[in-house]
């Protein structure tokens, strides 16, 4: 009954889960004072996150190159029509097809929750990002207000349903701690988006006031050094993690 109540209200504000206004703002900040910019969207789909700010950058007289990684051939035509150089790989096992320190900005929005091999993907994003480059992450929030309420009543959080597509769940604390200790990143920005089950205007306000309880969370990191996940994984955790040759 509680879950049905939440579902009945959430459809009107679901678009906020993608946090595109946040990603647009942070991407434009990352482009400040640059004459050239290389952008990678990991799990780019049709390229909607890049389109979100592409026109703004075009007006700034910046030479921008857009790249995308995805796993589905069905996304190729739409992404390439938007000016994205798309490469199809298995994100969990394939080394990213780029040189070290290649990108100024990497975006991975609503993708990490679908992938088990977090350590490998985070290590690859660090490798291909320039020192001082920005990484923008968007994920469903395990600690959202509605998930806390569901757990209180002994129900499964919507961000990690057993009968659902998500295989990992995240909070701000877990991402910040992991990427600062082992990922070679420092957190610079944090925001939340959407707040079930309230209508969009109120959901926006509540997410700004209580970002840790929002439906989706967004974190902007700066690369400060190389990744070192192998130090953590040496404890014996079973994973397919590998480092590039």
Image (cartoon, rainbow, N blue to C red):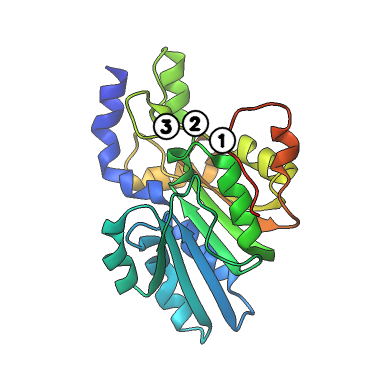
Return the residue found at the far front.
245
In this orientation, does residue 215 appear? no
Q: Secondary structure at mark 2?
A: loop
- Whichever of labels 2 and 1 marks the residue nearer the N terminus, that label is 2
Q: Which mark is residue 159?
A: 3
Which badge, 2 or 3, comes first in the chain's sequence? Answer: 2
Residue carrying label 1: 171
Q: Residue at x 61, y 40 (%)?
A: 175
Packing grade of label 1 (10 A; few <14, some 14-19, many >=20) is: some
The residue that label 2 is drawn on is 142
Could you tell me if the residues under marks 2 and 1 are in contact, i.e. CB atoms within 8 Å?
A: yes
Residue 10 lies, with reference to residue 24, above or below; the image says above
Res 228 quadrant in image = top right
- At 69% from the left and 26% from the top, the residue drawn is 236
Find residue 180 and report its horizontal and vertical position in percent.
Answer: 72, 45
Compared with 44, 200 (above or below) is above
Which percent across, then down, holds residue 144?
Answer: 48, 32
Distance CA(mark 1)–CA(mark 3): 11 Å
Mark 2 vs 3: CB contact within 8 A: yes
Q: Secondary structure at mark 1?
A: loop
Report the Cα–Cα distance between label 2 and label 1: 6 Å
Q: Residue at x 32, y 49 (%)?
A: 15
Q: In this view of the protein, which residue sits in the foreground, 211 or 93? A: 93
């Amino acid at each position: 009954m509680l879950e049905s109540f939440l579902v009945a209200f959430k459809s009107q504000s679901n678009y906020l889960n993608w946090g595109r206004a946040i990603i647009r703002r942070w991407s434009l900040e990352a482009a400040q004072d640059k004459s050239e910019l290389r952008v990678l969207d990991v799990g780019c789909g049709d390229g909607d996150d890049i389109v979100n700010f592409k026109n703004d950058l075009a007006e700034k007289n910046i030479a921008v190159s857009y790249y995308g990684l995805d796993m589905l051939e069905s996304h190729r035509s739409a992404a390439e029509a938007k000016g994205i150089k798309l490469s199809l790989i298995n994100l969990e096992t394939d080394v990213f097809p780029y040189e070290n320190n290649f990108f100024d900005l990497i975006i991975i929005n609503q993708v990490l929750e679908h992938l088990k091999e977090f350590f490998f993907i985070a290590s690859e994003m660090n490798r291909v990002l320039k020192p001082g480059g920005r990484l923008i992450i968007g994920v469903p929030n395990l600690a959202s207000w509605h998930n806390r309420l569901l757990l209180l009543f002994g129900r499964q959080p919507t961000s990690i349903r057993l009968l659902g597509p998500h295989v990992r769940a995240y909070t701000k604390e877990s991402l910040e701690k992991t990427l600062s200790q082992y990922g070679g990143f420092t957190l610079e920005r944090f925001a939340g988006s959407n707040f079930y089950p309230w209508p969009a205007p109120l959901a926006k306000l509540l997410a700004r006031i209580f970002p840790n309880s929002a439906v989706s969370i967004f974190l902007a990191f700066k690369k400060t050094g190389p990744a070192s996940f192998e130090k953590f994984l040496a404890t014996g955790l079973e994973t397919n993690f590998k480092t590039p040759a």
